[in-house]
Structures are given as C-alpha cells and as structure tokens.
Image (cartoon, rainbow, N blue to C red):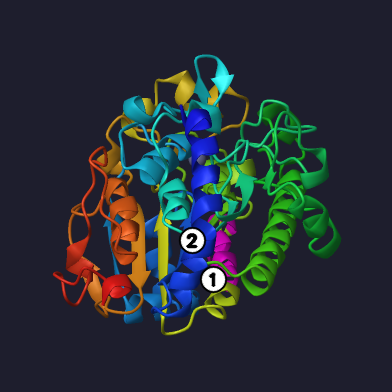
Amino acid sequence: MVLKKFPLLLSILLLALPVIGQQQSNSKPKPRVIVVGVNGMELDIIRPLLLKGLMPNLSSVIERGAYGKLRTVSAPNCPRVYSTLFTSTNPEEHGVTGFIVGGITANTNMLKEEPVWSMLSKSGITVGMANVPATFPVMPVNGYMISGMLTRGKNCEDGVLCAPKLSEVMGGDAVYPKSMQAELLKNVGDFYIDCERMPAAADLKGHETELIDKWLGKVQLIREQQTKLFDYLLTTHPTEFTFLAQSCEDRTGHWLYPITPFNVGYNPSINGVRIDAFPDQYVAFDKVLGSILKHVDENTYLIIFSDHGIKPLREFEEKDPHAHMDHEKTTPVIAKHDFADGDDVPGSFFAMGPGIKHDLRLMGLGASVYDVAPTLLHIYGIEQPKQMRGRILTEIFENADNRVAAKQ
Ligand SMILES: [Zn+2]
C-alpha cells in the first residue's frame, strides 16, 4: 500500500518544491524538531542516575520541559511500538505486529498506514532520519533516511537483533537517497546499523566475564559510531524534522539488568559480573544526548521518548522456559518488555521547546505512543488525519489553544 503511495509522494514533492521555496522566503521558518528514540528506556533505572547527577543532559531537558511515562501497546517490542508511534494506529491496523510477521522479518513494505515522516514530507517539511527501528528498506522522504533495527546484511541475514555494517547491507537500501551512502562511508565510516547480537548461553559458559566485556566494548564502539553519524547529519544535513534512534540500551538490559539473587534466572557468573552495565548505558546515552543538544537552540523542539520500559522477569514466568530466552533464541534473558500487559512496562516521554511548559511532570499513563505523531503534526500546524488514534498532548503546551508556532 505504502509502495503505491510513495511514487505519488515523490511527484507531489517535485511539483511542490519550487512553490514551497517561494513561500518560505516570505513567511516564518517552519518549526525545527529533533526526536530522539531510545529503545526500552526504563525510568526505574534512570531515576537513581538523575539523582546521582550522572545524566546532566537529561536533567537539563527535564528542567526545561515536560516529562513522564508513555503508555505503550500490549506485548510491546520495537517494530510493533515504533510502527504504532509512526502511524498512530494499532499494530493490527498498520501491520507490523512484531519482529516477524507471517514468517518474514518485519519491513517497511508491510506498513499499511501512512507514517508521520511521509505526511511531513508531503507538507514540504524537510525530513532527516537515522537508525530508527523498522525503517528498512528505507522509504523516500523530503530529505534523507538511514535505516535502523531490522536492517538485513552480512552476519545478520534475518535482520533480527543483530548489526550489519553499512557496506554489507543486503536485501534492500539502507540509505535514501542512494547517493548519500558513498558520502557517509567516506565521512562517517563503515558504521554498524543497530546493535550487537547478544551472545548465546553456550558461548558464555566458562567465558562469562571475557565475553561480557567484549560485548560491552562492541556496544560502546557502535554508540561512538552512532554519535559521529548523528553529529555529522545534524551539522552537514540539517532538516526541519530529524528523527534519530538508539537501540543498544535495551539489548543490554535483556541480559545484564542489575537483578538480585532472588530474581528469576539469576546466574551469578553472568549477573554478578558487571552490575552497572545496564545503568552505564544511560550514562553513555546522556553523552550522546549532550552532542545532540549542541544542535538544539531555543527555537528547536526536542522530544526524547522510549517505546517501552524493561523489567526483570516476573513470578509468573518462573515456570515458563520460553521467558528466559530472547525471541525464542539462545540468549539467557533476565529482563523483558513483551508482557501481555503493556502498562507493566511504560515507555517515557520528554519534551522541550518553544511554548512547552517547564518542569512539568505528566502523571499516570495519560500520554501514549499513539499521541506522539499527532503532537508532531500539531507542532507543524498540520491537521491530524482521521485514521490516527492518538491525540495532541495539549497539556504540555503553555497555550493549549495555540494552533502552533507554524501558524502564529
Ligand atoms: Zn528489547
């Protein structure tokens, strides 16, 4: 369906661009929005780090904006929730119900509802996206798109929870426009897309500390490459709407969550080794955020969100052998998020920018992943299409009636 829509989108863009150029010269510039997705950011882990002063950049965003829990869908996982967030429709409607759909790795050809970046592109907003989950193969936008989680390639043939290098991507394009790939390889390097695969239980046995340290080293390498990529894009290819995402935090949590001996699945030779490994991911994320914040001025909206949280396994999973393995694979998982009750693992939401309230805490689960796309459209003064199930998060704005910056 989307494939059919996109030639239309391109022709609309080609027709509209000269007109938009003229309009821009004698009207106010469009709002600038940077969205940062953090896969599985867990507030239970974040809060002690904020108190310890280990996340100064996120603390500054909280002081200058609004934040709280973000209600997610049931049995949340990355492709399922991100696609819900892109389209503000439920998983059965948009079609990307999980990592694997009908035996095939989830991909953008399955997306049955129009994503927000397409709507923004059609409205003449310049769009830049990097490493956002479930965006492979990339789709045409009014700007650029570099795919994220579920990108397939060498040593990552099924694309599920592994990391191909940009030059080794297979089965579709990871970069739009295609010509940008050579530029990225030259100026950023042959970076990994998405995060390292988790080691298997059999490989870990007897080599736990060595393998954990090696894995964490690779995670940090990927993060450094990603930081360089984000900084390069924000410097060299600034766009009105930019959507960046990280995914290593969540994967670390799945097998290195700081659990205690009474927790389900506790194995001292793994879980007693690097107990700060998971919290450390957020300390490292805060540094990435610091480099993004250098590109955020007082006229820029910054939205940080996570698609779900992550919690240690529960009492009802003690007897379920599948609960201990990641996506039916081989990693000994001790924390997860695809609980049937999504309210057990809410995501989180942080927003700051022109007209957004300061130091506002959102209570309860009033804000949901369905609300992000309508709120983004609101910032650009674009009417919410009928199929969207979410609402504009008016409570975060100083003036709820304000039909936004774009129309002032
Ligand atoms: Zn996960």
Q: Badge 1 is on which residue?
A: 289
What amino acid is found at the position of numbered circle 2 in the picture? Answer: Val
Q: Percent x, y for residue 186?
A: 86, 60
216 and 126: which one is in front?
126
Give the left or right position of residue 138, taking residue 396 as reference. right
At horizontal 65% and vertical 31% (from top left) the residue drawn is 159
252 and 32: which one is in front?
32
Give the left or right position of residue 189, taking residue 253 as reference. right
| Majority secondary structure of magenta residues | helix
Residue 273 vertical position relative to residue 327 in the rendered view, above or below? below
Give the residues drawn in magenta, as a range.
277-289
Q: Percent x, y for residue 268?
A: 58, 43
Give the left or right position of residue 40, taking residue 271 as reference. left
Q: Name the quarter where the C terminus is drawn.
A: bottom left
Element type at mark 2: strand
What amino acid is found at the position of numbered circle 1 in the picture? Answer: Leu
Q: Badge 2 is on which residue?
A: 36
At horizontal 82% and vertical 44% (from top left) the residue drawn is 167
> Can you see residue 262?
no
Give the left or right position of residue 14, taking residue 28 as reference. right
Q: Is residue 298 magenta?
A: no
Quadrant hosting residue 220: bottom right
Neighbourhood count class around disc 2 (C-alpha, 10 Å): few under 14, some 14–19, many 20 upward: many
> Can you see residue 398?
yes
